[in-house]
Image (spheres, rainbow, N blue to C red):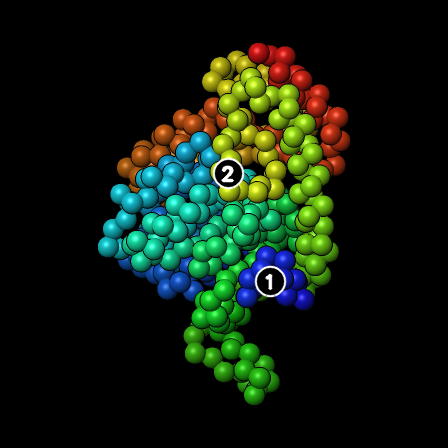
């Protein structure tokens, strides 16, 4: 039922619920026939799960820096493409879309597949289409830090029946769910693993999904309250013109270390925090990932590290009244 709701909501033919967003990325990669010897191009600002999923199928992550949108710099992709490249994996970070027009153009030119990591931007649109439905497949996450949650869990979206067929079998030990046989005698052609979502998570997901539009609307009101106070004095994260964001975070930049510290201290004193930037930057920036990536590849992402090091992310929490965001905005404004 939750899968059918997602297909209807996000306007795609196939939705498969799985155990996590990470599992969704891995299963989708396997469904796109990515394996040992293949390369997958992704970005330097993401959650490490994206890299882990690529490594777990035996492929090699190729990392591009990000631009002022804090998403993949499309201008860097072409030079990273090799004969081993199979997939471009853009990550829509913290509620804002990648330039999917640019991604589609490059993928078409080079005959590459697109897997959208939309774990952090569920509900965001680009040119009127929901993220996760623009590429060949999309991965969503419903963990506790996301805009809607099933506690843990994820979803794979696709309009390609062959991708859905493989993913559906692989996530369930290879079961084909052949209607001619009971489950205990079910047929199979591939081996799989257990990445199933539970029925309880599905029940929660149905309720959560019904609230998504309301959540985005209320996020927007808090976001705009902050923007009104800050936008003329600080550099704000760029949002592509075709993007309809979910206003998950308000991200801006401050180069002055002392001023940045005052702002961050204020956010933590009010128990709002900074959601990834800077409090969890080490888990969201590939410059720190020499345990998973070659050191030379890590060094190439210093441009992203330098940009993210100046960023402050104010998470939008619906349980915090708009008045608090106005107060924080006025405090940040008063420092200039």
Most foreground residue, 81 or 111:
111
Tags 2 and 1 touching, CB below 8 Å:
no
Q: Which mark is residue 241?
A: 2
> What residue does disc 1 label?
7
Question: In the drawing, does residue 24 fall left or right of residue 197?
Answer: left
Q: Position of residue 210 (x, y in %)?
A: 71, 54
Label 1: few (<14), some or many (≥20) within 10 Å?
some
Q: Residue at x 62, y 16 (%)?
A: 333
Mark yes or no: residue 55 visible. no
Most foreground residue, 102 or 318:
102
Looking at the rendered image, the quarter that the N terminus falls into is bottom right
Q: Position of residue 330 (x, y in %)?
A: 67, 17
Looking at the rendered image, the quarter that the C terminus falls into is top right
Marks 2 and 1, the one that precedes in the sequence: 1
Q: Is residue 27 above or below residue 42?
A: below
Q: Is residue 195 above or below residue 73?
A: below
Q: Quadrant of residue 232?
A: top right
Q: Position of residue 301 (x, y in %)?
A: 35, 34
């Amino acid at each position: 039922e939750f899968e059918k709701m997602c297909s209807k909501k996000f306007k795609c033919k196939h939705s498969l619920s799985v155990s996590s967003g990470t599992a969704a990325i891995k299963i989708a990669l396997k469904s796109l026939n990515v394996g040992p010897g293949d390369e997958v191009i992704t970005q330097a600002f993401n959650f490490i799960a994206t890299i882990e999923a690529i490594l777990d199928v035996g492929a090699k992550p190729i990392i591009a820096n990000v631009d002022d949108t804090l998403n993949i710099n499309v201008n860097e992709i072409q030079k990273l493409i090799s004969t081993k490249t199979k997939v471009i994996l853009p990550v829509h970070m913290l509620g804002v879309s990648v330039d999917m027009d640019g991604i589609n153009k490059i993928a078409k030119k080079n005959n590459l597949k697109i897997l959208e990591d939309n774990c952090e931007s569920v509900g965001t649109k680009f040119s009127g289409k929901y993220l996760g439905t623009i590429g060949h497949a999309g991965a969503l996450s419903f963990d506790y830090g996301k805009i809607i949650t099933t506690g843990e869990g994820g979803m794979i979206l696709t309009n390609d029946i062959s991708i859905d067929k493989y993913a559906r079998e692989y996530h369930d030990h290879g079961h084909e769910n052949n209607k001619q046989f009971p489950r205990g005698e079910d047929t199979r052609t591939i081996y799989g693993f257990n990445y199933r979502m539970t029925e309880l998570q599905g029940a929660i997901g149905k309720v959560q999904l019904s609230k998504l539009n309301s959540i985005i609307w209320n996020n927007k009101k808090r976001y705009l309250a902050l923007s009104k106070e800050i936008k003329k004095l600080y550099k704000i994260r760029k949002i592509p013109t075709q993007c309809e964001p979910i206003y998950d975070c308000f991200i801006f930049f401050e180069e002055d270390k002392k001023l940045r510290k005052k702002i961050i201290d204020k956010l933590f004193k009010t128990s709002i925090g900074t959601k990834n930037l800077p409090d969890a930057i080490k888990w969201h920036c590939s410059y720190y990932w020499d345990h998973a990536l070659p050191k030379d590849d890590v060094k190439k992402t210093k441009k992203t590290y330098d940009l993210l090091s100046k960023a402050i992310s104010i998470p939008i929490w619906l349980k915090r009244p708009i008045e608090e965001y106005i107060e924080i905005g006025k405090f940040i404004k008063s420092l200039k």
